[in-house]
Image (cartoon, helix red, strand yellow):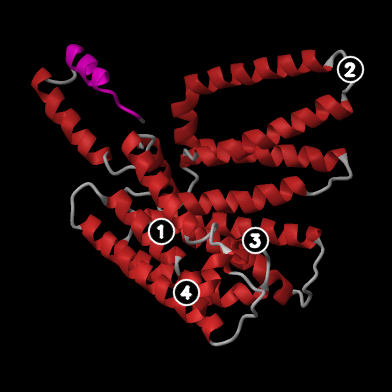
Amino acid sequence: MQIQRQQLDDAAAAGLLVPAQVGPLWDFLATQTAQTPSFRATHLLYYLGGLLAIGAMSLFMTLGWDLWGGWGLLLIALAYELLGLGLTEYCLRRPGLRIPAGIAAAFVVVLTPLAIYGLQAGLGYWELSDEYRDYHLRIDWRWLWMELATLAVGAIMLWRYRLPFLMLPVAVTLWYLSMDLTPILFHDSDLQWQLRKWVSVYVGLLMLGLAFWIELRSRSREDFAFWLYLFGLLAFWVALTSMDSDSELKRLAYCLLNLGLLLIGAVLSRRVFAVFGGLGVAAYVGHLAYSVFRDSLLFPLALTVLGAAVVYLGIVWQRHEARITARLRQYLPAALQELLARRQLS
């Protein structure tokens, strides 16, 4: 729920608030939401600068950095990590700087694989032809120590600082770990892509389950589950969508699954589910239009009628939403009822 100052003025004009309360109440609400990530110019600058720094030390590492040698990379990574820790502590001691504190803390976690790579290179575990930037490009079981160390540092940083943005490198590393573990689990370094896709589907489901578990247990106003939801859906939905289907029944099941994602997004107030679900439904409708009913004159008419029926369903739902929702929630566990109540008010 987003509140504007004019809405408080209207409430005062309707006698629901004393006019003298509008200003202090607005200031209080503005203070409470100042540290909630949003599309404000300040927050966009925070994230843009942070992502540039994180990308520079991860995705965009060039071959020139290898000239420092393993021990040189280790010392550089440790120096940057100390700088990131110092910035994290500095920001946390100043009011209103929790978002840049989270970005600085995530920077520390992102540097962990570089530090481990430098240590391994210094000890002679990497060949001269191996490059650090391949960590983000290639699937290789040899990255496991880097990933496990990153998860360990991420867990320590989360325990110490409780900053939601730390979940970003943790979620990405879990995704990487699942891909690099696959050759080990199946004793084959040259697995077929179909098997890799199924592994990605199951790992995505596990990440979604972990995110939901965190959301159920968390009593914090900050969102620690978002990044796990995002990368869990990426792993699950992209792998499922890229699979070849040999029957229309399976494609229909895919559409129904995406409708389920839309429903979950509506229940949990998670737009990320609605985005992926909407893309999946649109892809299925596009398949029907361009393949199954390519030359049909009735398909556009039927689709229009279906769209109108969905709109009408929305109108009926709006009229009876409170009663239907209250009745359905009676059958849910208490923890889930509490979560839905929090989501409804947010």
* Region rendered in magenta: 2-15
Q: Main secondary structure of the magenta part?
A: helix
Circle 1: is it few (<14), some (14-19), or many (20+) Cα within 10 Å? many
Q: Secondary structure at mark 2?
A: loop
* Mark 4 vs 1, N-terminal side: 4
Q: Which residue is mark 1?
A: 166
* Mark 4 vs 2, N-terminal side: 4
Q: Secondary structure at mark 1?
A: helix
For the C terminus, which image quadrant? top left
Look at label 1 and name its amino acid. Leu
Queried whether the magenta region covers residue 136, the answer comes back as no
Q: Nearer the viewer, residue 117 or 296?
A: 117
Image point 87% across, 23% down: which residue? 293
Image point 34% across, 55% down: which residue? 102
* Mark 1 vs 3, N-terminal side: 3
Residue 329 placed where, x, y %? 47, 40
Q: Which residue is mark 3?
A: 137
Q: Is 106 placed above or below 44 here?
A: below
Q: How many marks?
A: 4
Residue 335 placed where, x, y %? 41, 52
Q: Which residue is mark 4?
A: 73
Cα distance, mark 1 to mark 2? 51 Å
Circle 2: is it few (<14), some (14-19), or many (20+) Cα within 10 Å? few
Look at label 3 and name its amino acid. Leu
For the N terminus, which image quadrant? top left
Mark 4 vs mark 3, foreground winner is 4
Cα distance, mark 4 to mark 3? 19 Å
